[in-house]
Amino acid sequence: MDQKNYKSFSSKVLLFGEYMVLNGGKSLSFPYKSFSLKRSQQYLLNNKYFFQKLVTYIEQHDRLSVRLSRDLRSEVDLGLNFESNIPVGYGLGSSGALVAAIYDDFFIEKASESNELKTDFADLECFFHDKSSGIDPLTSYLNKAILSSPEGIQIVPKVELGPFSLFDSGIKRTAKEAIRHFNKLLTESDFKNGLSQLAELSDIMIERWLNLEDIADEMKQYSTLQLINFKDFIPATVEKEWRKGLDTNEFYLKLCGAGMGGMYLKYQLI
């Protein structure tokens, strides 16, 4: 392989809109540059079987396959490899960054419009999660903060964590498992009602956050509702910390992506 400086793709943080975004709701995400992924200069055969399955998936996809370069199959056979420090199974978009890198390097015709890109990325990332909004890879690919809504994609001014920080559960999980459980819960009316309340609060927090307004009251309501409705997505060790925050009003926790482990978001008040 010729020595080349390959493009780096950041991890992402989904600040608001977890699970709502899978059903067309609003979300706010931004590239989190503490972690990133890029194509490696060195070939490695250890991951060959995984990448062969990914290539086969793309080749069998009617819409994506016609724009896929044959170079991907040949590079995979040689041992295509990526260097990454994005924790896998922690909700920081490791699969999204990989999808963005492959799309950037191996798709002959790329979508030029954000909503079309989102569709491409959603179809690609379904290989990993069964269902994808496409927001994770889109955030990594554009390297910009993104407001996604039923009206489409909007690039927003620089977004930072602010009073939020990442809370590490220390538990690796698969988004696919969490998403499947979420889809199962959608058949229950009580869960759907709780999700509707969360979606309404999330939309309010997105608007207030972008207007640089305080969201402490909404965060407490949101954290309380998630503890009730997403209990299955909160490990016991995290639940203990979650309740402590609500009892002391020092901080509030919320999901950061799929839940069931990985990273959570802590909103610090004191």
Image (cartoon, rainbow, N blue to C red):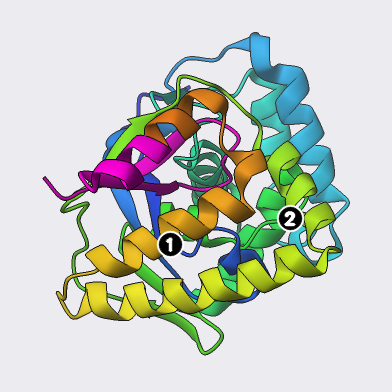
Location of residue 53 in the rendering, given as x and y in whole percent from the top left corner: 81, 32
Q: Residue at x 71, y 29 (%)?
A: 51
In the rendered structure, the answer to whether residue 31 lies left or right of residue 45 reads: left
| Residue 152 lies in the magenta-colored region | no
**Relative to 55, residue 79 above or below:** above
Badge 2 marks a residue whose secondary structure is loop
**Residue 4 occupies quadrant:** top left
Among the two numbered marks 1 and 2 on one chain, the one whose residue lies closer to the N terminus: 2
State how many labels appear: 2
| Image position, residue 263 (x, y; %) | 43, 35
Give x and y (percent) for residue 117: 55, 69
- The one nearer the camera, 236 or 60, is 236
Start and end of the magenta stretch? 243-270
Q: From this viewpoint, is residue 121 visible?
A: yes
Whether residue 71 appears in this view of the structure is: no
Q: Which of 24 and 59 is in front in this view?
A: 24
- The image shows residue 36, relative to residue 206, as above or below, that is above
Q: Which corner quadrant of the image does residue 202 belong to?
A: bottom left
Is 265 in the magenta? Answer: yes
Mark 1 vs 2: CB contact within 8 A: no
Element under disc 1: helix
- The residue tagged 1 is 222
Q: What crowding class fits label 2: few (fewer than 14 Cα within 10 Å), some (14-19), or many (20 or more)?
A: some
Q: In the shown orientation, is residue 15 left or right of residue 270?
A: right
Q: Report the amino acid beneath label 2.
A: Lys
- Residue 131's disc number: 2
Could you say where residue 41 lies in the image, as x and y percent from the top left? 42, 20
196 and 125: which is toward the camera: 196
Q: Which residue sits at x=70%, y=30%?
A: 74
User: Which residue does the image show at 80% across and 70% down from the upper left?
Assistant: 189
